[in-house]
Amino acid sequence: MDQSQFLRLAHSHGERITAFCQELVRMPSLTGEEGRVAEFVLETMEALGYDEALIDSAGNVIGHIRGGSGRSTLLHAHLDVVDPGEPRRWTDGPYSGVLRDGYIWGRGASDDKGCVAAQVFAAALLKEAGLTPAGDVYVAAVVGEEIGGLGSRYLAGSFHPDLAIIGEPSSNTLRRGHRGRCEFIVTLRGRSAHASVPAQAINPHYDLARLLLALREIDMHYEPVTGGSTVAPTLLRSDQRSANVIPGELMLHLDWRNAPGESPEEAMARLQALLDDTLGEETTFSLDVRTDHAISYTGYEQDVRQAVAPFWMETDDPLLLAARDQLQQALTREVAVDVWQFYTDGGFLYGAGVPCIGFGPGDPRMAHVFDERLSVDELIEAVAGYMALALQMGAVGG
Ligand SMILES: [Zn+2]
């Protein structure tokens, strides 16, 4: 195959792809409110000639293009966006989808609707061009990513492709993994009393002080590429609202980024050991993972534990080497391999045994900021990249 055929195909459909991405950005889709944009993606897949397209019980849109007898490949991206904040801080308003200076502007342009648009078209353009993928190709536009992976947790429990390409902004470079994230809540329980008689209280603030100092010295799991696991105390809450009462309970939130090689369970065990060593002279304490009850727009409900595993692939993994080779040929340039600083839904699929590779258009620094935008050139190039991966990765390994 001519190495530039993917780029030529993507560019020849550039206007359709750009218009689709603009429409996606114009449909606000805060987490839990993805129904309209999901219907639009479903209709687009049907219009583009997908062999099957459906919305599952969690609200994820799944499209299928039939391939040969090789391994199956999932292209994965998310439909939900974070709140745009104060609308006046956006040059054109948060959901303008306007095309200006070579960029599509608006909340979600980079995170993550450019990836959705590129993936939806990549699989369809293969079929339109009469190119049969080596194995079945699935495109999942999932819900609930921004609140801890509601849609992908459901997907990972019900569907096991041989490989997942995780679409999150990477400026069209490859990503071979990221750290996970656990949000722990340590509750310290003492005895409340009037602040004028501290001797009658067991003030949990003193144990909190011991805990914070011990946390700064804790021996964390080390991994050279990501720099290893880190922990940061973030929110602190009390059971009191008055400044003249000694609280009976303090709740400290810890943001723990677990590096590859440290599962959420291992991170929790490490923290539990520190708590056992440091606390409990007078107060009692408990350790929990923050858990939120989440409901998708379809009514699907789940308790979402805020404990996300890393995904990881070694530099010499044949899947990664093949993906890099295919992308370099398709894009006719060098494609770097790096890791993501943030975490993605890939952790849930990886945890279910699905190898994951990251690739997507958009600057990672554009995620969750005012005047979020996506380079149209990157969007179109990403279509060519996803086409190459969807067509050929099913022939690798197995
Ligand atoms: Zn994202």
Image (cartoon, rainbow, N blue to C red):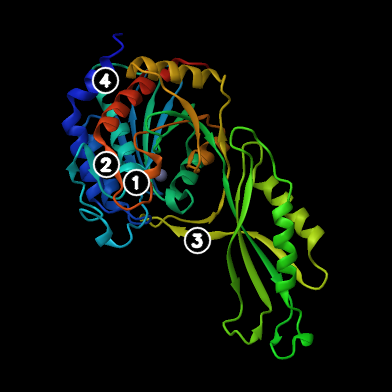
Position of residue 109 in the picture relative to residue 174 (left or right): left
What residue would you read off at disc 1? 79
Element under disc 4: helix
What residue would you read off at disc 4? 7
Q: Quadrant of the N terminus?
A: top left
Q: Which quadrant of the structure image shows residue 263?
A: top right
Residue type, mark 3 in image = His
Front of the two marks 3 and 4? 4
**Marks 2 and 1: in contact by CB < 8 Å?**
yes
Image location (x, y in percent) of residue 307? 58, 50
Label disc, if present, on residue 41 of the rendered structure: 2
Q: Which quadrant of the structure image shows residue 9?
A: top left
**Marks 3 and 1: in contact by CB < 8 Å?**
no
Distance of label 1 from label 4 (alpha carbons): 25 Å
Distance of label 4 from label 2 (alpha carbons): 23 Å
- Decide: is 246 above or below 344: below
Residue type, mark 1 in image = Leu
Residue type, mark 4 in image = Leu
Front of the two marks 1 and 4? 4
Going from N to C along the chain, the mark reached first, 1 or 2, is 2
Image location (x, y in percent) of residue 365? 40, 43
Element under disc 1: loop
Image location (x, y in percent) of residue 92? 20, 53
Asked whether residue 181 is in view, the answer is yes
At 58% from the left and 42% from the top, the residue drawn is 309
Front of the two marks 1 and 2? 1
What residue would you read off at disc 3? 293
**Marks 2 and 4: in contact by CB < 8 Å?**
no
Q: Nearer the viewer, residue 75 or 325?
A: 325
Going from N to C along the chain, the mark reached first, 3 or 4, is 4
Residue type, mark 2 in image = Val
